[in-house]
Amino acid sequence: MTSRGRIAIAVCALCVAMGVVAAQAEGPRSKASSADVARGRYLVVIGGCNDCHTAGYAPSGGHVPEDRWLLGDGVLGFKGPWGTTYAPNLRRVAASMNESDWIVFARKLKARPPMPWFTLNQWNESDLRALYRYVRQMGPPGDAVTPFVPPDQAPKGPVVQWPAPPQK
């Protein structure tokens, strides 16, 4: 073998090694199949995610274009003894983490009402992955919504007033 051949092989080996190292540094990539995306969309619909996380979805009977789904609702607040919460933009939440971090996040989430975090904590891993993959393929993450308002401050705009939880 010529020295040029050896150099070419060495360069190819180096490129492959660099690609492997770069891929490992990035962490596992999500491979969103059309079945994963369809499952994630189904879970969003039956899980009622749009009811809060898509502005105008519930009052319109679900007639909001899909390209506006899960962008959050910074207008309508949910007020109770905890303060006032606004449904976050799930596209931004998912875009801020990789798939593995999403699984941990969903399993450990504790949130203020009306978020049913206690049900999300019970989803199986394949459903959480499908949800993540659906949300990540939806398009631009959009803007952040109105932040939480503490109970001693008045929210701006309309709110749904929630009662205090029942006493045990």
Image (tube, grey):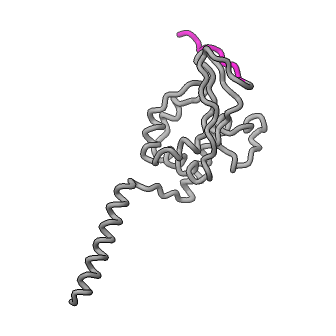
Predominant SS of the magenta segment: loop
Instruction: Verify whether residue 103 appears in magenta.
Output: no
In the image, residue 118 above or below residue 134:
above
Q: Nearer the viewer, residue 19 or 160?
A: 19
The quarter holding residue 166 reads top right
Q: How many marks?
A: 0
The percent coordinates of residue 3 (x first, y second) are 22, 87
Instruction: Give the residue displayed 60% in from the left and 47% down from the top.
Output: 141
User: On the image, which quarter does residue 29 sit in?
Assistant: bottom left
Q: Quadrant of residue 80?
A: top right
Q: Nearer the viewer, residue 72 or 109?
A: 72
Screen quadrant of the N terminus: bottom left
- In x, y percent, where is residue 55? 71, 37
The residue positioned 26% from the left and 77% from the top of the image is 10
Q: Is residue 41 toward the left or the right of residue 98 in the image?
A: right
Q: Residue 168, image x and y in percent?
A: 53, 10
Q: Residue at x 74, y 41 (%)?
A: 62
**Above-or-below relation of 102 to 114:** below
In the rendered structure, does residue 163 fall within the stretch colored magenta? yes
Work out whether 1 lies above or below 131: below
Point out the residue furthest to the top here.
167
Measured as percent of width and height from the top left, residue 122 is found at 48, 35
Q: Nearer the viewer, residue 138 or 19?
A: 19
* Vertical placement of residue 138 versus 8, above or below: above
| First to last magenta residue range | 159-168
Residue displayed at 28% across by 74% down:
13
